[in-house]
Image: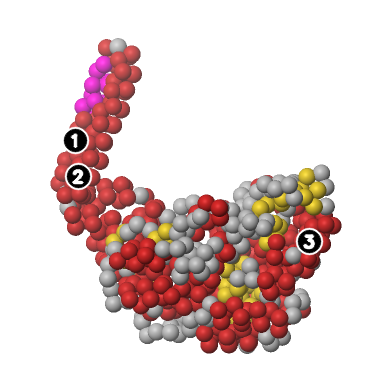
Amino acid sequence: MRETGCQPTTSNVKLRFESVDFSEIPQQSKLFLQYQSDPLSLRKYYPSVVSSHTDVAGRRSEVLESCVVERSKLCDALAAQNERFGGGVSSAESIELLRRPGTVAVVTGQQIGLFTGPLYTIYKALSAIKMVSCLRDRGVSAVPVFWAATEDHDFVEISKAFLHARGEETSPFELSQAADAVGNSVGRLPVPDGFENILNERFAQLPETQFSNELLSMLSATWKPGRSLGEAFSSYIQRLLQNYGLIVVDPLDQEIKKLVAPIYGQVAAHAEEIVARLVKRSAEMEADGYHAQVLVTPDYFPLFYHTDDGVRRSIKSRDGTLHVAGTKLSFAPTELIEAIKDGPEYFSPGVMVRPVVQDYLFPTICYFGGAAEIAYFAQNSEVYATLGRPVTPILHRQSLTLVEPRDFRTLGRYDLSFSDLFRGFDDVRRQVVERFVNPATARLFAEAEEAINLELNRLDQEVSRIDPTLAGDLATRRRKINYHLGALRKKFQRVQLERDETANRRLRSLFSSVLPHGQLQERVLNIGGFYLNYGPAVIDRIYDSIDLDERGHRLLYL
């Protein structure tokens, strides 16, 4: 364990953390591990890759030269949005700074989720904010921008929020969706009627802390029934990060749609070449032993169409005609380009072109994303090349597990490391029972297994001498004996731990907090549970802990 090398900028708390290499964490892709360990070796896929965040500042001139959107119109639209979101003084100051021709943007984003969704949403925003601070220290005028992906349509993915407070795992908060809204862009959907009752009822089940009223007040003020999910999400993240100057952008906004219409048109005009290059790129990645994150088939089209009923539908290319899936609508390529000019609000970008749209709208000097987005960027650098746009480098957002004092004590009490938890609850339970809860019985099982196998070995020698065919029969029965003894041993471990209520409670709390549902904490838990325990100070501590040179996963001890 060591202390952070960065001086805290928002609090006087001494930070303690550990770094865990991603190679020790299961289910990491080969491409991501390579990108984190040696990004320059992947220049083939990432033409603007940097070895350190400090190299990003050198892109400033290139980024400003490629900026074509009229800043005054963009900032007017952002000012109206963020005023509606309750962005406050610091957000307004960032927007005014963006009006200046020499200012660049550090961009990140995420599909909107209930109460900001998983923790990594907050980590993305704070990573971008920290990068802005570093750029300003180097004399580069910069602002942080959060792209709220309101156009996406996967409601199930964003409808739940898991809050874990005071070591207690509770059922998730959950949004309901009207049957006739399936497939709609999530940002347009309303917070359902009666959600305030669900919010109050579920909140009452959480442990009460000194910050309970404060958090409930924030949630009630932002997640109001009838308000769109996009506005609720944007308002809530602005409340949480109100002192950090974050600019939130909702791409469903009509003024934003007008500004990005030209790049939509360029994408449509070059769609055939874009698809061909993406198909080729995917094949190259697979030939090099990497997994292509997005499957791009020859009939793929890089834009979506939004029908009048609000459903976001894919467009498929067949025989020179563009067909809107699930409808009778079809366009010739030239007709689609005209449709974009006349009604850009009917279109939204697919994942392969969304970064280019963002970087057309903003003077983006770098983007912060997760492992999946890093994989996207390996493919969509071909889109940038096709459209003649400078490729934006992607940096991995800070990856964190917040370890609370009780969980730190449990790890120490049972001599466990963070990496031990990836073996699973059952395996860790065995270790704890056999080393700390009832080592005497555990030794007895081990001695019994050793003695039984010793005697079976003697018996094997004897029956083999009498009749070799008996040895095979014995081997089968030996496996059954060992299986049943092992099953009895597991039952003993389970029963023993259940009888030791303290150890059982500690271990289950540890897993539900540090590795919930068998996944990294940042992919499951919401910031709300930590806000309940520590108040707004937890945001500052997370921000202070961020080290942009860190390429591993960081354990932050609260």
Could you tell me which residue is drawn at 46 percent across and 80 percent down?
6
Mark 2 and mark 1 lie on one chain; the one further toward the N terminus is 1
Residue 352 shows in the view: no
Q: Which amino acid does label 2 sit on?
A: Val
User: What residue is shown with label 2?
Assistant: 495
Depth check: give the residue in front, 60 or 225.
225
Q: Check if residue 462 falls in the magenta segment.
A: yes
Compared with residue 529, is residue 443 higher up or lower down, i.e. above or below? Answer: above
Q: What residue type is labelled 3?
A: Ala
Q: What stretch is highlighted in magenta?
A: 454-463
Depth check: give the residue in front, 138 or 342.
342
Q: Position of residue 20 (x, y in %)?
A: 43, 63
Is there a contact, CB below 8 Å, between mark 1 and mark 3?
no
Is there a contact, CB below 8 Å, between mark 2 and mark 3?
no
Q: Position of residue 232 (x, y in %)?
A: 50, 70
Label 2 or label 1, whichever lies nearer to me, is 2
Query: How many neighbours does mark 1 have within 10 angstroms: few (below 14), some (14-19), or many (20 or more)?
Result: few
Query: Which corner quadrant holds the N terminus?
Result: bottom left
Mark 2 and mark 3 lie on one chain; the one further toward the N terminus is 3
Could you tell me which residue is drawn at 45 percent across and 70 percent down?
224
Query: Which corner quadrant holds the C terminus?
Result: bottom left
Locate residue 29 relative to residue 119 in the image: left or right: right
Could you tell me which residue is drawn at 27 percent across and 56 percent down?
507
Label 1 or label 3, whichever lies nearer to me, is 3
- Which label sits on residue 448? 1
CA separation, marks 1 and 3?
78 Å
Instruction: Give the colour scheme shown.
Output: secondary structure
Q: What residue type is labelled 1?
A: Ala
User: What residue is shown with label 3?
Assistant: 339
- Dot 2 lies on which element? helix
- Dot 1 lies on which element? helix
Query: How many neighbours does mark 3 have within 10 angstroms: few (below 14), some (14-19), or many (20 or more)?
Result: some
